[in-house]
Image (tube, grey):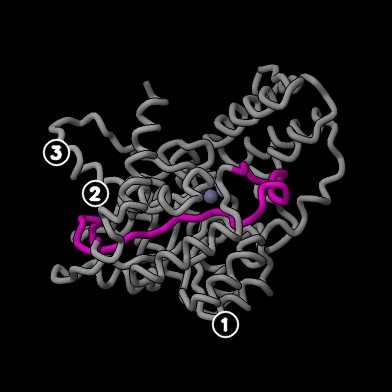
Amino acid sequence: MDGFKQFCKAGIAKGLFQGRLLNPCKQGRLYTGSGVILQYHSVSHPRSSYHYLNPGLSVTPEDFERQIAFVTRYFRVVSLDQLLANAKDQEICETLFAITFDDGYRDNYIHAFPILRKYDVPATFYLTTECIDGGLFLWTSELRYLILKSPKFRMHLSSLSEEFALDTVPNRMKSLEKIKGRLGTMSRREREDVLSEVCHETGVRDMTPLKATMLNWDDVRTMCRAGMSFGSHTLSHPSLPHIPLDEAKKEIIESRESLSARLGKEISHFSYPNPGNHLNFSTELKQILKNAGYRSATTSMQGYVSHGYDPFELKRKGIYRAYSNLPDFYFLIKKEAILQRLNSFVGTKWLKSSQRTRCT
Ligand SMILES: [Zn+2]
């Protein structure tokens, strides 16, 4: 049944797009709130990023360029600051777009940055600052690399009291997701202890291919001079609601200070990391962010920015490989609006929209 629904949705998307029944030029008023924040992670070819990132979370440079060309042709792409300022204005009828990137992968600089410059559009990059400082890999990339490269067929982790199968690629992927889910709810100390054990048990010693997978400060400064903006994605990419509050505070405050010192600018924007896809924000965290001087925080929830929005609980549209071609990309952007319109015709909630996006 799910396959049939997917088939129908894909058919609707292609029909609407190709048949121009919902011409993008005339879609400004089809309800999408006052703003759409696009959420990217990686712009890369699957073969080159497979060792540090789930290929489903990236888009190819070619697809990224097609998407940027599309949004710049039919909509107005602005900075996150401008989108949030305009969304406060009740009178605004136009839907603005802002582009964001999570994590701080170096492929953002290599592949996405030249395209953003070509189309003269700004973007906000949320950085995991300890990875930019050098020496540390993003822990989700490290875990992925260790599991994928291990010569072993099974692995017992005493820290998790569990054995994991590594005999086939699907089993490695299942083990990876399971361990990532558990690490995603641990304090930094616990997570690092488990990672050390994974490193020992997998028998992987050469981590060289993981070097230079994250941006460095020279890249960041070059992009900053070209008009790109930067926000914090914490120091080390934990799931903030699952770690002690003091630790969460340190991740939030010190990452902002580090960015501010390196770039000589005030840092106003934050993105909640979402390793393991748990709920990744809370009322207490929002208060800590406000007290620390941030003005906004983006989540991994699907949706638009509308008048009366909560600046510390911003919804986005996660763009992944599954939405590579333009009809699917366009359908994702207008999904809630199109489904609402179609549901009003057929008088049912048969066409539902999922609420959560994926994340590293
Ligand atoms: Zn992230």
Q: Secondary structure at mark 1?
A: helix
**Tag shown at residue 65:** none
Image location (x, y in percent) of residue 142: 71, 43
Marks 3 and 1 close (CB-CB < 8 Å): no
Give me the residue at 59% from left, 30% from top: 177
Q: Position of residue 304 (x, y in %)?
A: 29, 54
User: What amino acid type is highlighted by mark number 3?
Assistant: Phe
User: Residue beneath label 3, please?
Assistant: 345
Q: Secondary structure at mark 3?
A: helix
Q: What residue sits right under mark 2 in the picture? A: 337
The number of callouts visible is: 3
Q: Secondary structure at mark 2?
A: helix
276 is within the stretch colored magenta: no
Residue sticking out furthest to the bottom: 225
Q: Using the numbered discs, state the Cα–Cα distance from disc 2 to disc 1 in whole angstroms.
A: 37 Å
Q: Give the quadrant of the C terminus.
A: top right
Magenta residue span: 27-55
Q: In whole angstroms, how far apart are the C-alphas of marks 3 and 1?
A: 49 Å
The residue wearing badge 1 is 225
Q: Residues within 10 Å of mark 1 (few under 14, many from 20)?
A: few
Q: Nearer the viewer, mark 2 or mark 1?
A: 2
Residue nearest the viewer, comparing 170 with 194: 170
Q: Amino acid at mark 2?
A: Ala
> What kind of residue is marked 1?
Arg
- The quarter holding residue 214 reads bottom right
At a point 71% along the width and 21% down the height, the residue shown is 158
* Mark sitting earlier along the chain (3/1): 1
* Left/right of residue 110 with respect to residue 81 in the rendered view: right
Lower sequence index among marks 2 and 1: 1
